[in-house]
Image (cartoon, rainbow, N blue to C red):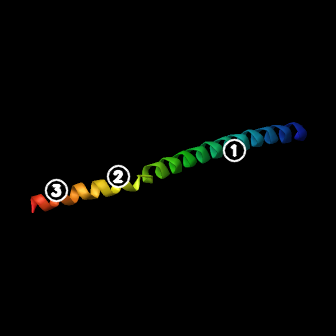
């Protein structure tokens, strides 16, 4: 009887570990995706930054 209970406990424990592993993989994938999005958002070409700054400076110069 004890062997049956031990076996059931081991199966439940294995199921729990597999669920945790799946959750950990999903979280890792989400973090990797979020990091990639953050990197892509930061990758603005220098020319675009300079053009936007020049345009903003022109607007400020004409406004004030």
Report whether 1 appears left or right of 60: right
Mark positioned earlier in the residue sequence (1 or 2): 1
The structure residue drawn at horizontal position 54% and vertical position 45%, both measured from the top left corner, is 33
Residues at marks 3 and 1, CA–CA distance in whole angstroms: 54 Å
Indicate the quadrant where residue 53 lies. bottom left
Indicate the quadrant where residue 47 lies. bottom left
Q: Name the residue under label 1.
A: 21
- Confirm or deny contact between disc 1 and disc 2 (CB under 8 A): no
Q: Work out whether residue 1 or residue 53 is closer to the camera in this orientation and state it.
A: 53
Q: Where is residue 59 in the image (x, y as percent from the top left)?
A: 16, 56
Mark positioned earlier in the residue sequence (3 or 1): 1
The structure residue drawn at horizontal position 59% and vertical position 46%, both measured from the top left corner, is 27
Residues at marks 1 and 2, CA–CA distance in whole angstroms: 43 Å
Indicate the quadrant where residue 5 lies. top right
Which of discs 3 and 1 lies nearer the camera? The answer is 3
Q: Is 64 situated above or below 26?
A: below
**Marker disc for residue 48:** 2
Residues at marks 2 and 3, CA–CA distance in whole angstroms: 16 Å
Q: Work out whether residue 31 or residue 1 is closer to the camera in this orientation and state it.
A: 31
Badge 1: residue crowd in 10 Å (few <14, some 14–19, many ≥20): few
Q: Name the residue under label 3.
A: 59
**Marker disc for residue 36:** none
> Quadrant location of the C terminus?
bottom left
Badge 3: residue crowd in 10 Å (few <14, some 14–19, many ≥20): few
Report whether 34 appears left or right of 53: right
Q: Work out whether residue 28 or residue 2 is closer to the camera in this orientation and state it.
A: 28
Badge 3 marks a residue whose secondary structure is helix
Badge 1 marks a residue whose secondary structure is helix
- Confirm or deny contact between disc 2 and disc 3 (CB under 8 A): no
């Amino acid at each position: 009887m004890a062997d049956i209970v031990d076996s059931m406990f081991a199966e439940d424990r294995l199921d729990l570990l597999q669920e945790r592993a799946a959750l950990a993989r999903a979280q890792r994938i989400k973090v990797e995706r979020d990091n990639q999005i953050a990197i892509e958002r930061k990758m603005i070409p220098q020319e675009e930054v300079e053009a936007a700054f020049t345009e903003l400076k022109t607007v400020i110069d004409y406004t004030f």
